[in-house]
Image (spheres, grey):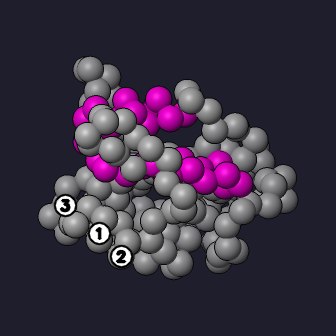
Amino acid sequence: MPTPTDIPMLNLPACDLHLRRQDASYQVFDFLRRRYVRLTPEEWVRQHFLHYMIETLGYPAERIAVEFAIKVNNCQKRCDAVVFDKFRQPQMIVEFKAPHVRLTQHTIDQVAVYNLRLNVDYFIISNGITHLAFKLDREASRFVMCGQLPDYAGLNRLTEG
């Protein structure tokens, strides 16, 4: 079980995470789910990235769902995070990986499967060090990489325009 000092530095702003020791492991307080969860390298990335989305990129916390359950081809799946628009329609999928996990085509394909159900225009994948953002090109029916992570205001300008 990792300790906070075992996890590498992330390419994200520092944030104030609340940790506690539970038996032989650590837990981190998930401020969106309002409960402590097991600290894993992927959870470390999730918590830092969600703070970044809310505190730096302006995403409203109330429009983000964590561990969002969906059904794809009769299989239960969970999106790490989903951002919703003001009408509670899915707008973006965010997938997190541990810092040591390379972001590959397999990771992109995983999110593409989730999108069969959610039909979003954007998705982000991050291992805390590398962050990739993609936008759906509806004419070509494929996702294309964005140059930077969209802030919430920019995301809404792009989807409403």
Q: Quadrant of residue 105?
A: top right
Amino acid type, label 3 = Arg
Q: CA distance from mark 3 to mark 2?
A: 16 Å
Q: Nearer the viewer, residue 44 or 152?
A: 152
Whether residue 129 is situated above or below residue 138 in the rendered picture: below
Residue identified by numbered label 3: 88
Pointer 2 and pointer 1: residues touching (CB < 8 Å)?
Answer: yes
Q: Which residues are magenta?
A: 107-134
Residue flagged by tag 1: what amino acid is it? Asn
Cα–Cα gap, marks 2 and 1: 5 Å
Residue 96: image location, x then y, percent: 56, 47
In the picture, measured across the screen, residue 48 lies left or right of residue 68, that is right
Q: Residue at x 31, y 36 (%)?
A: 140
Q: Residue at x 84, y 59 (%)?
A: 5
Q: Are marks 1 and 3 in contact (CB under 8 Å)?
A: no
Mark 3 or 2, closer to the camera: 2
The residue singled out by tag 1 in the image is 156
- According to the image, label 2 marks what residue? 153
